[in-house]
Amino acid sequence: MELNLTRIDYMQVGLTSSRCLRVIPNSAPKTQQKVVVGDHDGVIQLFTMKRGEVQFGFRAQTEKSITRLELGGAIGTIRDKIFLSSGNEVRGYTKKGKQFLGFDTNLTEEIKSMHISGSDLLVCGDYVYNHYHDCQDSNFYLAADKINDVITLPVERMKYLVPILACEDRLLRVMRDSEVLYSVELPSPPTSLQLFYNDGGENGDKLLYGTSDGKVGLVQLGRGSAMHCWVCESGTTVSSNSTSQHGGVTCMDHHDMTGDGVRDLIVGRDDGSIEVFSYEDGDESEPTLRFSMACSESVTSVQGAIVGNAGYDEIVASTYTGWIFGVTSEPMDRNMTSESGVVLISQDSKHKIQRLRAEIDELQQRVLRERDQYQAATQSAFPGISAVPFFSVNDKLTLNRTDASYLLSLEVQTAIDNVLLQSDVPVDLLDVEKNSAVVSYSTCDSETGNFLLATYRCQANTTRLEVRIRTIEGQYGTLQAYITPRLQPKCCQVRQYRIKPLSLHSRIHNFDPNRPYNTLTLKGQFTLPEIHAWVVFCLPELPERTPAGDQAEFTFVSTFLDTQLQCVYESGEAVFKSDNISTISILKDVLTKEATRKKVRLDISCEVNEESVVHALQLLHPRLEAQLLLAKQVSLIEALRELGSHESDTSFLSVEYQHIIDNADDLQAQYRKQPCHLERLYGMITDLFIDKYKFKGVNVKSRVPQLLEILDNYGSLSIQHLVNFFQAQ
């Protein structure tokens, strides 16, 4: 069934955080509902729609930004009480605007996520989880990594409280009082949690999670373990088999949008996508995408409801910059008729158009008056004040494991004029399909430490920009983004991002002991916080906070090569194991440099496993073959097309050449997406060769041209030839 939904804007508030919009449930079905929203200006307001006009129920002000808004109520009753978090305070309001709760949690961190279950209040900062029962402190937990969301399974079905924490280290932590009952490993860092069907399913034990790289999954949580039901990969489109990376999941909800009696899954993403998934035949298999739309701003909240007109289901959504709108099933042409080619509209629609025109005229006059006053103030003989306007930037640098690249997303509350990227480390900029900005490159002098200078000029009314970046492991430094909005007077905000030495490594929790590992051991007079700070400097996705206990252990996988790295360290000793000798070499160089800078003397020992080199080459072999084949196919496209223009019948061509002609556009697009992939593989193999002999104290740089010659002819040679070259003394 194809869904036909149309966007209709309601109002604009201040900047909003994730899940700061809620729809008040009604006891009567198919009747209009009230919407409550809180913003960064500290304003909470409740509104309804009446004859196409916004009618405000109440409006209240808090001192600090509202970071989360939840609905609550006694167990078994309608959840129509409004709770919001602001700073470290939680407030409660009735739907008529009367404040009945003002609770200072005394947390040292600002509340980032919150959940209400009857008389139980769960709040989380970045690392701290607190459970309050009737506003009395009951349980506390200090997480090892950042907490992104919190939720509980329904108490009315489970008969006891089961809190779940979504943590940045790719774990769901199922709590029992102040202890972790067990953890559930996920494929990516979870960013949002939602009960299956909004009630946990038949037994109340099913939970949906959304991840930072766009996956949506379902887990069934038992008393002592969990079962993964399905994972819906990002990138599936409604009408084609092509894939495109979707943004991270910020919010989810369930509502029957298709009218088949089964609630559909609604997903909001940080790239501006809103999607509706249907569960086939009401079962719990992987859902199917039924509808997708994109807005130009990241979506912070979605809820299925009836708001605009009674009887018409819609998705109420909020964006980062504060737009509140509905995606409604109501036909927009129902107030229009056509006679003899002339379109007639209803009287209500005419009045609405007239009011909008009058409002636009008034706004234009106000803008002109303010502009004239500002110009007069700047030209006055009296000393005036010209304040640089402040603007908020919502930015994120995320590692994508599928193609070993980083996605830099920049979102501003006003239109972006241009963004200048500067890097003191070599990086490649890759194409982003959704990016409409025009990029221009400036020449850089690498000898002065400047490797990249690129300017993105945005189109009018662009508030969000995405840039895909691929780094080189071993090369580390700083990437800077200079963001200039369309504001007067002209101003710019600078954001910095650290490119780490092992930037293409990603956290995992399973270490394979059966691989051929190289071992690096460091001993010296360093403390656990010191060695942890050095490891954080080298590797991404690690918490800045030093882990609790006397020893820390982390495991990583290379997103480019699938090799593993294990880090085990404590005060005075650190052991690193990897089946890629180049990873060990990078760690040795960087950690030695950091220890020297801190004037810490190290005792360093390395154990090199010769089998690890062959193992790494075997991992590189299929990637190298595929890239060489792709490069060869792309180089033949023009010649085959020219041949096809002279010959009407190309059936005499071989199957290989016919395949190239038939898939020419796809091959070229694939090659454009990763222009330096082959060079990167050549570089990794070269580094592997140099590092292998560096640990033996032999300089083999003079033999690199021979290695490159073997790689250039790799298609006609076997991998054994390359292995023999590596093993030759």
Image: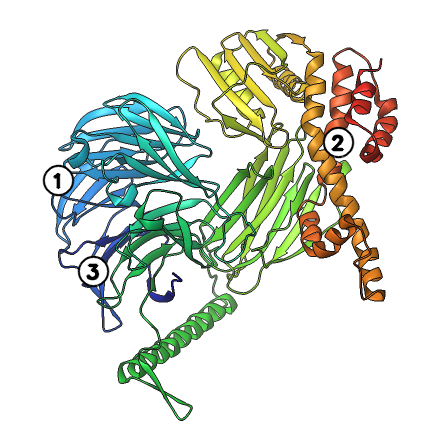
Q: Sort mark 3 into few (<14), some (14-19) or many (20+) by Cα contacts within 10 Å.
A: many
Q: Quadrant of the N terminus?
A: bottom left
Q: How is the image coloured?
A: rainbow
For image coordinates 70% across by 25% down, the residue present is 618
Amino acid type, mark 3: Gln
Q: Is residue 638 left or right of residue 476?
A: right
Q: x, y percentage for residue 239?
A: 50, 58
Q: Sort mark 1 into few (<14), some (14-19) or many (20+) by Cα contacts within 10 Å.
A: few
For marks 1 and 3, give the CA distance: 21 Å
Judged from the image, the secondary structure of the residue bearing numbered disc 2 is helix
**Residue nearer the viewer, 518 or 500:** 518
Q: Is residue 726 left or right of residue 616?
A: right
For image coordinates 65% across by 22% down, the residue present is 583
In the rendered image, which residue does mark 3 sit on? 33
For image coordinates 72% across by 12% down, the residue present is 610
Q: Residue furthest bottom?
A: 340
Q: Quadrant of residue 109?
A: top left
Whether residue 449 is visible to the viewer of this picture, yes or no, is no
259 lies above or below 182 = below
In the rendered image, which residue does mark 2 sit on? 683
Q: x, y percentage for residue 669?
A: 67, 52
Amino acid type, mark 1: Ile
393 lies above or below 416 = above
Contact (Cβ within 8 Å) of mark 1 with mark 2? no
Q: x, y percentage for residue 84?
A: 24, 45
For marks 1 and 2, give the CA distance: 61 Å
In the rendered image, which residue does mark 1 sit on? 75
For marks 3 and 2, give the CA distance: 60 Å
**Residue nearer the viewer, 699 or 581:** 581
Amino acid type, mark 2: Gly
